[in-house]
Amino acid sequence: MLRLEGLEKRFGDVVAVSDLWLDVGRGELLTLLGPSGCGKTTTLRMIAGFETATAGRVLLDGRDVTTLPPQRRGTGMVFQNYALFPHLDVHENVAFGLKAQGVPRADIPRRVERALELVDLPGYGSRKVQQLSGGQQQRVALARALAPEPPVLLLDEPLSNLDAALRERTRSELRALLKSLGITSIFVTHDQEEAFALSDRVALLRAGRLQQVGTPEELYLEPANAFVASFLGRASFLPARVVAAEGEIVVCELSGGVRWPAARGGVDARPGAEVRLMLRPEAIALTADGADGAGSLPGRVTERQFGGATTLYRVETPAGEVLVQAGARAAAQGDTVRLHPADASAPRVYPATEPPSR
């Protein structure tokens, strides 16, 4: 449905987006995720036509729209600040895009009301924008984008102005609505939890370059590099040396002589190679000191953060600090403990020369 071919955007000497190739399927909800300044919004604005690409092409349903103005591309956009007109009521705000599209005047009331019904605001047409809550304004902005029935909907952090509870509820409603309508959607956010909750697939950007694209599960469980691993959730990285390799599993020796298996993950990790071992907190088992120590890493709990169902422990070991997620009563601050992987493929190796960075 949407294809980006070698898309690039330069602002003088600054490269905001570099050689971006991406395909978005019909009806798919894809999120552009990454830290501030990584090129997410610039990419969205190039798709919409609000920014001119320095190089590359934007194809919409096989049609090259790279040089077309926004109103001729057939995309709808929901802005971060909603961009509602305060001097117009809800009906007039939603009707604005229909008028610009040249929809016959007689059809506009019906389509405005249908768009308001889709976002659960029937009968709100005569309300003033200033009378609405933040969540209601967000839905009016969505209704305005949906009213022209665009084949592609672009959303630039539309939930960022909502409080935490409303944001969580709204994103569930938003995903259900977009999937029920079958609209191809591109969502921009820097919040990984939001990306995971909304998306069919996630495209993670860093400094204008695509790092990895895949389902939320693929990015979290099989990160392509150390940046992806460190940006998506918590992770510990320990220096290690490969001592054996068989297929996709390698054996790594940590400081102190402890040996742990790990997934190769596409890294050329031959015996003798220096690597960094990535550990997810929930994939490390924590036991009391004195339990079977074979293959386990000794450590001391330096911090304990209670989080309800689980507790996060910071454990200082001879190999470095390790974050462990376990039950609230697994250990107390100051306890000596032992750590080992919950399964052989849970740790992953990355080149020693590729330190994680957000």
Image (cartoon, helix red, strand yellow):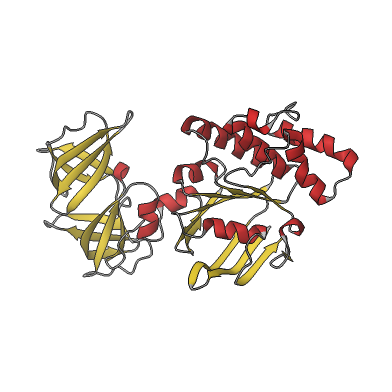
On the image, the x and y values in percent for residue 299 come to 13, 45
On the image, the x and y values in percent for residue 316 come to 16, 46
Q: Can residue 180 be seen in this view?
A: no
Quadrant housing residue 259: bottom left
Quadrant housing residue 25: bottom right
In the image, is residue 238 above or below residue 91? below
Q: Which residue is drawn at 61% across and 58% down?
A: 45
On the image, the x and y values in percent for residue 337 come to 14, 40
Q: Is residue 37 visible?
A: yes
Q: Which residue is drawn at 52% across and 72% down?
A: 12
Would residue 46 appear left or right of 206 to someone viewing this image? right
Q: Residue at x 28, y 68 (%)?
A: 353
Dividing the image into 4 quarters, which one contains the C terminus?
bottom left
The furthest residue to the top? 123
On the image, the x and y values in percent for residue 134 come to 58, 33
Would residue 87 appear left or right of 4 to someone viewing this image? right
In front here: 143 or 237?
Answer: 143
